[in-house]
Amino acid sequence: MSWMLNLDHMKDVDALRLAAKILDRENARLIEQNRVLQTRLMRLEGTDAETLQARLMELEQQLKNARQEAFGDSSEKREAPTTEAAQPAPKPKQKGHGPRPQPQLPVIETVHTLDPADRDNCAKCGDPMKEWKGGFEESEEIDVIERRVILRKHKRQKYVCGCGEAVETALGPQKLVPGGRFSTDFAIEVSIDKYADHIPLERQVRRFAREGLEVTSQSLFDQVHAVATACEPVAAAIHAHLLSKPLVHADESHWKLLDGDKEREQTRWQAWDLVAEDAASYTILPSRSAESAKTVLHGYAGIVMCDDYAAYDALKAQGVVLAHCWAHARRKFIECEGAAPQALLDEILGLIRRLYDIESTAPPGDTPDALALRAQRRQAESRPAVLAIRDWALAQRPLPRSTLARAIAYMTKNWVELTRFLDDARIPLDNNPAERALRGLVVGRKVHYGSKSERGIKVAATLYTVLETAKLNGLDPRAWLRAALKAHIDGAPPFIPVRALNPALP
């Protein structure tokens, strides 16, 4: 039987381990078969027993070499042979998979030497000990180098001409805030801490105090505001990029305005997000109305994947096609657990799961070939699965106003939008990308409650937009933000963290 394992695209460690075991067994089987056949052949040819035994030993060595190549240590990594007296004690067998590799961490080597008293007197004979060149016992330790806040003094050298008529002064560093006291890297640190790592400014004030810097939360906000102002063109370009997409995901969540006016204290605003595979944009507006939806998606005429919130219906007038989310429909049935027969719920949840199982076998991506194959799979398999869900819903007779009745009503009311994916391979099954993109904003809202002013709301929307987009493109937010602010200071075009718009990205 001829077969082959394709290991080129395997990334799962357990799958690779299993494949290696299979290949090892197959290799041993083939060598054993070769040994048997060669034994028969050599006996038929009248080969003497000594030659036959030598050939068998050669085949055994081939198997040993093959296993060493597949599973043994690399010869380049082996330690040089040492004398028997200097052999280290065998290490105990390591449990588990060993330490996780850390290729992104910088490596700092620290050499430890013996104290002079131990080095000058051998424990056995008393003679001085010599350094064993290249002889080390190595181990690794992950450490943290403490962050330091420093006061850097810039001294700009003055130059004077012998004529006494001209004085020149060397240029100083360019700053995000001209004449400001804080560096660009300081402003980046504060912005990343708040909008990527969700550390409130007041908590940062206390941490800076432990590090020797006395600063107020207002001073920190001024730095964040300067970063956001510089990034506004970037955020606008990201939003425009999303509106050029044939399909976007949309969702919304509340955001508090912590205004000092008692009548407006903790006013609930709404954070709207638009998401695609390479970009996310956030707009925080005073309401969740249809007008707000039109503001966020002004001029858009593609497909919007969303929930069944009525505000999105107003977008149909501008040519938007709505597609709804099967994850939302599924949640409605999960909410019925304990209030409806479990057998019925298991049946409908299994039918919905079948849609996801089919989708998981379809090729990802939006290339013409992937779209064609996905459309074919949906017609052949997803459409019958959807009809089975419809038949199940029509066969039910739940009690009026029960949770099961509401779940079925939700699904049937949105049936056209839920099944739109069958006729358009670009439409995914659910709106999970938009929900995932809201997680950072929701976590931030939980720890710093919202924004104290409308200016703070704009800062939050801008920085969440640029930092989340950087992460979606696999960029380190800190490194990207440093490059973006440098472009702003230099008067260069906005440095956008979207590879489709910025070929200079790594």
Image: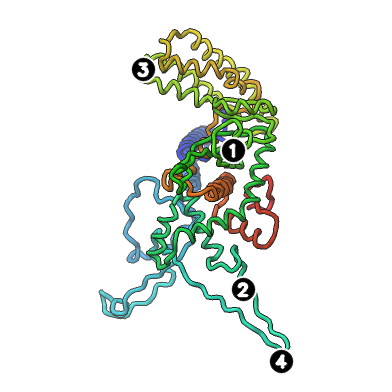
Secondary structure category for the residue under label 2: loop
Secondary structure category for the residue under label 3: loop
Q: Name above or below for residue 85 compared with residue 355.
A: below
Separation (CA) of disc 3 from disc 2:
70 Å
Q: Residue shown at 67%/62% (left/top)?
A: 490
Percent of width and height locating residue 195: 50, 50
Separation (CA) of disc 1 from disc 4:
63 Å
Separation (CA) of disc 2 from disc 1:
41 Å
> Callout 1: few (<14), some (14-19), or many (20+) C-alpha neighbours within 10 Å?
many
Residue flagged by tag 1: what amino acid is it? Answer: Val
Q: Name above or below for residue 392 compared with residue 60.
A: above
Separation (CA) of disc 4 from disc 2:
24 Å
Q: Earlier in the sequence, mark 4 or mark 2?
A: 4
> Callout 2: few (<14), some (14-19), or many (20+) C-alpha neighbours within 10 Å?
few
Q: Name above or below for residue 403 compared with residue 289.
A: above
Q: Earlier in the sequence, mark 3 or mark 2?
A: 2
- Could you say which is closer to the camera, residue 66 or residue 44? 66
Per the image, the residue denoted by label 4 is 162
Residue flagged by tag 4: what amino acid is it? Answer: Gly
> Callout 4: few (<14), some (14-19), or many (20+) C-alpha neighbours within 10 Å?
few
Secondary structure category for the residue under label 1: strand
- Could you say which is closer to the camera, residue 505 or residue 197? 197
Per the image, the residue denoted by label 1 is 275
* Quadrant for the N terminus in the image: top right
| The label number, if any, that marks residue 172 in the structure image | 2
Q: Residue shown at 34%/77% (left/top)?
A: 129
Separation (CA) of disc 3 from disc 4:
94 Å
Per the image, the residue denoted by label 3 is 339
Percent of width and height locating residue 387: 56, 13
Q: Name above or below for residue 443 compared with residue 428.
A: below
Can residue 146 be seen here?
A: yes
